[in-house]
Image: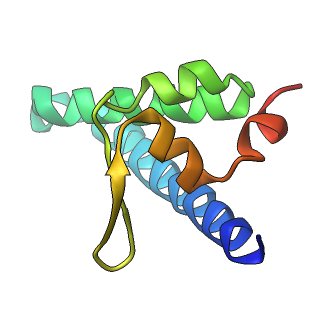
Amino acid sequence: MFTRTIRTVTVVVALVFLSAGLLAKDSAIDAHSQEVTDEERAALDVVARRTAAYNEHDIDAFLATYDAKVRVYEFPEEFLGVGEREWMLFLGLNLPRTMVR
């Protein structure tokens, strides 16, 4: 259980730092919008939606930002499975309780 909690915290911290970095990049790019490709804009949109859903404690919106066939690995290369159920198990069964108000 302790290992699962550490993994959950690690994933959440990584998502927060990734989101902050990409959103900061997005703000800096706005002044030079010709530098942003459609692919970059789409990636930034996903990160913004994922961060908003997490901050709003909306587990369904959070999960909707992942592909239905998400492949789940434990670092560095242990394959755990495919799909939303495996992703939820990886994040930790207590994630929905922490995200629900």
Does 11 sit above or below residue 74? above
Q: Residue at x 45, y 34 (%)?
A: 84
Closest to the observer: 85 or 49?
85
The colour scheme applied to this rendered structure is: rainbow
Left or right: 2 as drawn, with respect to 68: right
Picture coordinates of residue 57, whole percent (x, y)? 74, 28
Above or below, 61 against 86 in this view is above
| Residue 31 shows up from this direction | no
Q: Where 34 sits versus 7, above or below?
A: above
Q: How many marks?
A: 0
Residue 16 placement, left or right of 4: left
Instruction: Find residue 50 and report its horizontal and vertical position in percent.
Output: 51, 32
Q: Position of residue 83 (x, y in %)?
A: 37, 37
Q: Which picture quadrant has residue 69?
A: top left
Residue beneath the point at 24% across and 27% down: 42
**Can residue 53 be seen at all in this image of the molecule?**
yes
Q: Looking at the rendering, in which quadrant would you find the C terminus?
A: top right
Quarter holding residue 55: top right
Give the residue displayed 57% in from the left and 49% down from the top: 89
Which residue is painted at 71% across and 47% down in the image? 93
Image position of 47 (left or right of 56): left
- Of the pair 7 and 34, the residue shown nearer to us: 7
Kindly indicate the quadrant of the structure image that contains residue 36.
Answer: top left
Q: Position of residue 44 (x, y in %)?
A: 33, 34
- On the rendered structure, is 59 left or right of 101? left
In the rendered image, which quarter contains the N terminus? bottom right
Q: Closest to the observer: 32 or 10?
A: 10
Q: Residue furthest right?
A: 101
